Image (cartoon, rainbow, N blue to C red):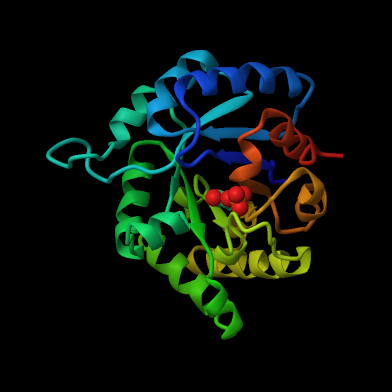
Amino acid sequence: MRKKIIAANWKMNMTVSETAGFLEDFRLDIEDVNGVEIVIAPPFTALAKLSELLGGSQKIRLGAQNMYFEMSGAFTGEISPAMLRELFVRYVILGHSERRQIFGETDALINKKVHAALASELKPILCVGETLAERDAGKEKQVLETQLKGSLAGVTAEQMLDVVVAYEPVWAIGTGRNASPEQAQDAHAHVRAVLAALTNAETADKVRIQYGGSVKPANAAVILSQPDIDGALVGGAALEPRSFSEIVKAAVPQ
Ligand code: PEP
C-alpha cells in the first residue's frame, strides 16, 4: 500500500506572517486526519519560521520548492541542500514546469539536483508533464519518458524509493482546467511503466506518483481514487487552509 502524499506548493506566495496564520488554522482543520503524508513547501523566506512552528511535526513535513546542487559557494541567489537540511526540510520539489519554462531548467540540470538531494537525504518531488502542444501532437508519453529518463539518470532502485514523481500536465497548472481522471490515470500508469524500465517492477510499484494541475476540494476525491494516483501536488488551492485541508481529507484511506 502506497501512503498518499498531499503537498502544497505555495510558489511565490505567503509572507512569514501569512505562513504563521495559515498554520494555525490548518492544524485545527487536520487535527483528526491520519494516514496521509502532508507536505508544505513555502517560499525560502518562510522555511525557517515554518520549521520552527512545526517543531519536528510527524504530521506535516517541510518541503522546499527548489535548490541548487552544490553544497556552498559562489552561486548568487541559490540555496543549497545543506541549508535545507539544517531547517529539517524533508522534501524538495525539483523540475517544476515553471522552473523548466521560465528559468530554463533542463533534464540534465534537474538530474544533478536529484542526485544532490538524495545524497543529502532530501526526498525529491520530481515534476514531469507535457505542454498542451505536446499533448495535441500525441507526444505526451514520449515527453514523459524523456523527462523521466533524463532527470532520473543514474538513480538506483534503492534511491528511487525516496523519490516522489509528480505528473503535472503543464496545460492544467493554474488554469482551472484539470486532466480528466482517465487522462491522469493513463499518464500515471505510463510513468510507473517507465520507472519499472529504469529500475524494476517491484520498485516502481512502491514509488508514489502525485497528480498536479488545478486540484481542488471539488475534484480531489475522484482524482485520488485512481489506482496509480498516490497523492496531489497542489498550488492555488493550497493557499487557503480550509481548501487545502479538504484536499488532504479526500486522501484519507477509506
Ligand atoms: C503546481 O504548481 O504544482 C500546481 C499544480 O498548481 P495549481 O494547483 O495551481 O494548478
Instruction: Tell me, yes or no, if residue 88 can be seen here.
Output: no
Q: Residue at x 68, y 19 (%)?
A: 25
* Vertical position of residue 131 compared to residue 54: above or below: below
Seen from the viewer's position, the closer of residues 139 and 82 is 139
* Vertical position of residue 170 compared to residue 75: above or below: below
* Vertical position of residue 47 compared to residue 178: above or below: above
Could you say which quadrant of the image residue 92 lies in? top left
| Image quarter hosting the C terminus | top right
Could you say which quadrant of the image residue 106 lies in? bottom left
Left or right, 210 with reference to 9: right
Seen from the viewer's position, the closer of residues 74 and 69 is 74
Q: Position of residue 82 (x, y in %)?
A: 29, 31
Q: Position of residue 19 (x, y in %)?
A: 53, 23
Q: Residue at x 49, y 21 (%)?
A: 50
Name the residue furthest right: 254
Q: Residue at x 28, y 36 (%)?
A: 80
Q: Position of residue 11 (x, y in %)?
A: 48, 42
